[in-house]
Amino acid sequence: MSGLKLEIVQEAPFSSVEEEALLNLLRTSDCLSRAFHLKTRDWGVTSTQYNVLRILRGAQPHGLTCSAIGSRMITAEPDITRLLSRLKALKLIRQQRDPQDRRVVWTQISEAGLDLLCKMEPIIRRLPGELLGHLDGAELAELIRLLELARKPNVDPQAPVS
């Protein structure tokens, strides 16, 4: 019996090897995401909010529009506006309307957001090693290659998430 079948207590065989691979990928993604989220929540932010803060730090000093932030995120977020509102309420970002086009809102990371990232950095930098350090360099390179290969025909950055 496969490892996944034991984990999810499934007795029936998978309908295909593709199904087993997909379910393994989804289970692994959830497991790693939860571990990452447990680290970020100690600072009062979600892993998705942390991702936005990192994106905005990299876009200094100009900042980014909502759509630009969404296109750079690791996980698709259906409601960027609400996510940014929460970060603004925490005073981790600031926003301003574009003087030439009032429909466009520019978002920048605030000093408080930069300070938070500075505090989080030592813990978050260790996390990939804690989560994947049991794999050697060749295994990690192969994992990256296979994940990119699996994702390739399915990547559409313009596809709606909701």
Image: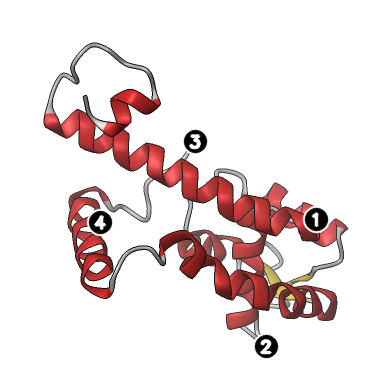
Residue 61's disc number: 2
Depicted 51 relative to depicted 33: above or below? below
Image quarter of the N terminus: top left
Residue 162's disc number: 3
Q: Residue furthest bottom?
A: 61
Query: Considering depth in this image, is 102 or 134 the residue closer to the camera?
Result: 134
Residue 122's disc number: none
Secondary structure type for disc 1: loop
Task: Return the residue at label 4.
Answer: 147
Disc 2 residue type (three-letter): Pro
Measure the C-alpha gap from mark 3 to mark 2. 31 Å
Q: Residue at x 39, y 37 (%)?
A: 27
Disc 1 residue type (three-letter): Gly
Task: Return the residue at label 1.
Answer: 44
Image side of residue 68 versus residue 37, left or right: left
First in sequence: mark 3 vs mark 2: 2
Disc 4 residue type (three-letter): Leu
First in sequence: mark 4 vs mark 3: 4
